[in-house]
Amino acid sequence: MPEVTQIFLTPASILVGALGVARTEGLKTGVSALGLLSTGLWLWALGAPATLSMRLPLAWLPILFGLAWVVSLLIHGSRFNMESRRHVVELDADVARSFPDPQVVNHVLRAQLAAHALLAAQLGTDARVRPNPPLQPTGSAGG
């Protein structure tokens, strides 16, 4: 049993360190899930909990880590969920502010179209947009 505990205690300690330096709630949630998974493997490698002698301190380690990872996963998972919802709302508000009011845009476009039609009428041309004629070479370049 000490060998199995030593094998799983090192990664569990590294994951605790990774949880401490993780910057985002999503990453903390992922690290917590990995920690819980590794603790489950640790308990499975030790054998069924009913067959373990709970008097041994090493048998309590995976249970302690498992409880800590469950708490960590619940806390960071709920904070990640709230954080992701908050960002969506802020993004929607930011996007809405970056676009002008549709009624104003419609009014401006109608005014531009009327001005274009008026100019076309004054020039005696059709108000439809025509493609530009192809450019004609004006002379040879170089000499």
Image (spheres, rainbow, N blue to C red):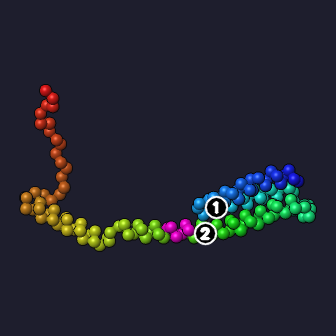
Residue 51 at what x, y percent from top left?
Answer: 91, 61
Query: Magenta: predominant secondary structure element?
Result: helix
Residue bearing mark 2:
79
Specify whether 98 is left or right of 89.
left
Specify whether 52 is left or right of 102.
right
Q: Quadrant of residue 117?
A: bottom left
The stretch of residues the image draws in magenta is 83-88
Alpha-carbon distance for marks 1 and 2?
A: 10 Å
Residue 60 at what x, y percent from top left?
Answer: 84, 63
Specify whether 18 is left or right of 8.
left
Closer to the camera, 107 or 97?
97
> Which amino acid is tagged 2?
Arg
- Would residue 30 be visible to someone looking at this image? no
- Would residue 3 be visible to someone looking at this image? yes
Q: Quadrant of residue 45?
A: bottom right
Residue at 14% x, 36% y is 137
Residue at 82% x, 56% y is 44
Asked if the residue under mark 2 is in contact with the one under mark 1, i.e. CB atoms within 8 Å, the reply is yes
Residue bearing mark 1:
28
Mark 2 lies on a secondary structure that is helix
Sequence-first tag of 1 and 2: 1
Closer to the camera, 115 or 90?
90
Residue 62 at what x, y percent from top left?
Answer: 81, 60
